[in-house]
Amino acid sequence: MTHRAGPVSVSDTSNPPSVRPPPADASAPLGRLLHWLAPVPAHGRAGSLAEWRERILMGILRASLVLGLVVFVPSALAAIRDQLWGVLVVDSVALVWVAWIALAKKVSHRSRAVQLLVALYVIGVTLLIEVGPVSELYLFCMPLFAAILLGWEASLTSLFITSATLVVLGALGHAHVSFAIRLTGTELFRWSIVSLNFVFVALVISVPLATLLEGLASTVERERELRAALEREQAELRASHERLRDEVEEHRRSRERATRLMTAVEQIADGVAIADTDGQLVYLNRAFRELMTAEQGQPKGAIDRLVDELAATRPSPDFVADGVHSGALRRPGARGQDRHFDVTVAPVRRPDGAPGGRIALVRDVSHERAIEARLRQAQKLEAIGTLAGGIAHDFNNILVAILGFTELVRAGMPEDGEEHRDLTAVLQAAERARALVRQILTFSRQVEDVRRPIELRLVLKEALKLMRASLPTTIEIAQDLGAEPWLVVADPTQIHQVVMNLCTNAFHAMENGPGRLEVRLDRVSRAVASADGASRLAAEGEYLRLSVSDTGCGITAATMERIFDPFFTTKERGKGTGLGLATVLGVVTACDGDITVTSEPGKGSTFRVYLPRWEEPPPAAQPVDTNAPAGRGEHLLFVDDEPAIRTLGKRVLTNLGYRVTTAENGVDALRQLGTTALDVALVVTDQTMPGMTGLELALAIRDGQHPRPVVLTSGLGDLLPPEQLDRAGVRTFIRKPFNAGELGRTVRASLDATS
């Protein structure tokens, strides 16, 4: 069994209390026996009287248990032989009782000690009654154990109990009660003498023993208190030492922080200068000297000149607040580009509040200013796109009237007449304008990235038509797009943007003279694409290669490394944002493709875009029905805020055999539907109207007492998701500008689907 040391003072674990007895050598048999008989308790104060009493109690209990087991067998046999049943019962109960006391560790020490004394008393009295005076030894041990285990009060109590017991037993023995004690007159006198000696010896031994133990406990406690006081003094000395060491360490760290701070200030990109109250420079970091071209040895005036420059840039002294001067400075830089600085000059105060000089902070914000300029340029382009979308919407309304009324007039003229031919030319021009407006809407509208299989050749043709209208005639456009319906999975708007950016980039390279722009589309394998430098292609299979070449100024090797960086541009200010090629790269890589560029200064450039080919067959082209089916007398409500379009819609639909009522807005339409007995079978409404949009009108009709199908028209393209249109009860969506045939077919199809 391993010796368990009791708890010690946490203030100094290296010096345990001196009263703590050293453990017996566990390797010696006697040591192991003593350690088993008197184990060190897991609780209690280290070296205290309570611990010693606990150890003595456990030793007595375990020794009694071992000896009791040895003595119990012959004692039990003798008791059975002599028919001393009381002795047998008492021995058995006493043995079990002692075993329980030894094992009951959760019971308090005092309770177990009292039970042990009671057991000794019962055993002694029983043996005296059954055996005779030899058993007085048990009663003699009782006050001794009480003195050791509980103190002198318990010892005196035990001595009184045992003395009284002896007197009672002597009186009963003299009365010839059937005990083992039979006392005559002489024997009673002897019994009294022995009992008095018993009391005297027990008193002489137990009381001094208890007093000695109490004195030892007091001495130990006093020693403990002195030791605790010494430990407190040592702890205070250690704390003082620690505080002194912390102060020294804090001073060292302060010096290190100051050193690090000076090192950081010296290495940061912002310029820092400090001057004393006389204007004498006391510190300049490296950045200040580089930014402001000042010398540290310059005696005076550097910060004062900064303040003067700041004042010169402001018409009024509003750059001063609480003694702090702040503002922006601009100075010429390398390659003709100005450098911009944010400057702050603030006073320095000493700890007592007295002036201590001034500090100047200078930051180079040239890069931020350039980014802000590019951002403003990008915002201008976004505003132009929004403006183009708005203009296209209004122009669509104009085209509706042009297309519709021209068709109406042409329908009443002979086909072989000159007027018919002239109106046909007008319709052809209007159709070209219609296609151009659709291209503008495709370029300017804000839609989510919706990828689907598209025929790349058609998107390229549409984009090149728009570029042809925007490029000068000095630029020749040559295109070889082939005739194969090759497909790629992409967003057509983004592919349109890629072509526009590449062609615009080529135009800027050729704007100083005539040039040739070549656009070619062909099909290559992944191996060929990789040989051309396309290293980002992961999937095997075929790729469509879009090549855009120009005969412009070309790209230098230094510029070639940065052409795809956002906001990088070699164009003059106001001619580019630096986002075009970066956008192209983002779109191409998002489609699992790649882009390469080859160029030679003075001989032009070639950009090649590789997109994975979608190998499934293209969707079959649906034949276009050019005839407008006739109506069957249904009543229609035509809603539009443009008078010309209302007039056109009524005439076209009336000519097709419908009964038509018009409304100038959504509120007017709801009023007519609610206050008159109109037998309206279908409502045709514009989306963009003042007061109430077409979708809101459709929702009101759906939630009314007599829901009707709705056909929605708009000049802004597909801006509403199909699910939202379906929930509003919109049967069909038709995009402006539409002609008479498209309007008639849409209305007829919606009515047939409703019936």
Image: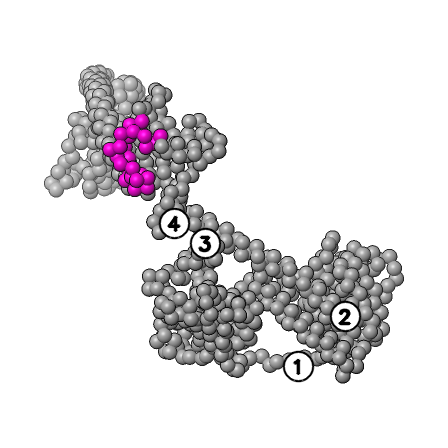
Q: CA distance from mark 3 to mark 1?
A: 50 Å
Mark 1 = which residue?
Answer: 623
**Of callouts 2 and 3, which one flags the residue occurring earlier in the amino acid sequence?**
2
Mark 4 = which residue?
Answer: 337
Q: Quadrant of residue 101?
A: top left
Label 4 sits on a secondary structure element that is: loop
Q: Which residues are magenta?
A: 279-304
Mark 3: few, some, or many residues within 10 Å (few <14, many ≥20)?
Answer: few
**Of callouts 1 and 4, which one flags the residue occurring earlier in the amino acid sequence?**
4
Residue 466 in magenta stretch: no
Query: Residue at 81% across / 75% down in the picture?
Result: 656
Q: Is residue 608 visible?
A: yes
- Disc marking residue 405: 2
Q: Quadrant of residue 20?
A: top left
- Disc marking residue 573: 3
| Labelled pair 1, 4 in contact (Cβ < 8 Å) | no
| Labelled pair 3, 4 in contact (Cβ < 8 Å) | no
Q: What's the amino acid at mark 2?
A: Phe
Q: What's the amino acid at mark 4?
A: Gln
Q: CA distance from mark 1 to mark 4?
A: 60 Å
Label 2 sits on a secondary structure element that is: helix
